Image (tube, rainbow, N blue to C red):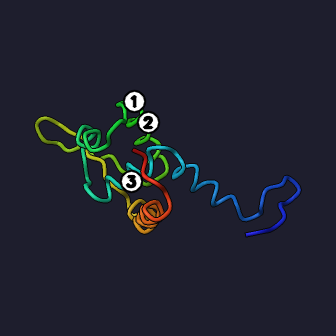
Amino acid sequence: MTGHGGPTGTHAGSEPLRRATAILGKKWHPVLLYTLLTDGPLGFNDMKGRIDGISDKVLSEALDDLQEAGLVVRDVVEDKPVRVNYSLTPAGQDLEPTIEELLEWSHEHLVESR
């Protein structure tokens, strides 16, 4: 892809891409989306148990980001005890092909660290 930027050096069509990468480019966001795609809906502790190396604080912040972006919904389940489940919105579910393509690309082009 080639082209010249506008007066500020930004490609005219890049704003939607910047908005998307602001969400998908964060370290844990694609992993959380993938986890909810494959195992969701999940409670906070169930999700934390499936994602190696994420802290409570980072998980909480990432879930807040994804909720704000309209990709994840937080549902309070009125059982005893009351619990919270996280699941994907339709917009979050629409990312499945993108997440799958990223996984496939990674398997084909990135060397596993040992």
38 or 93: which is nearer to us?
Answer: 38
Name the quarter where the N terminus is drawn. bottom right
Marks 1 and 2 in Cβ contact (< 8 Å): yes
26 in relation to 89, above or below = above
Q: Secondary structure at mark 1?
A: helix
On the image, the x and y values in percent for residue 18 come to 64, 54
Farthest left residue in view: 80
For residue 61, the mark is 2
Q: Secondary structure at mark 2?
A: helix
**Is residue 67 toward the left or the right of residue 13 in the image?**
left
Name the quarter where the C terminus is drawn. top left
56 or 75: which is nearer to us?
Answer: 56
26 or 13: which is nearer to us?
Answer: 26
Farthest right residue in view: 7
Identity of the residue drawn at 26% across and 46% down:
85
- Neighbours of disc 1 within 10 Å: few (<14), some (14-19), many (20+): few
Q: How far apart, in angstroms, are the residues tagged by discs 1 and 3? A: 17 Å
15 in relation to 42, above or below = below
Identity of the residue drawn at 37% across and 58% down:
89
Query: Which three-letter amino acid code belongs to the residue tagged 3?
Result: Leu
Query: Which three-letter amino acid code belongs to the residue tagged 1?
Result: Lys
On the image, the x and y values in percent for residue 30 come to 44, 52
Q: Secondary structure at mark 3?
A: helix
On the image, the x and y values in percent for residue 91 come to 43, 62
- Residue to which mark 1 is pinned: 57
Count of numbered tags: 3
Query: Which three-letter amino acid code belongs to the residue tagged 2?
Result: Glu
- Which quarter of the figure has residue 5? bottom right
- Residue to which mark 3 is pinned: 33
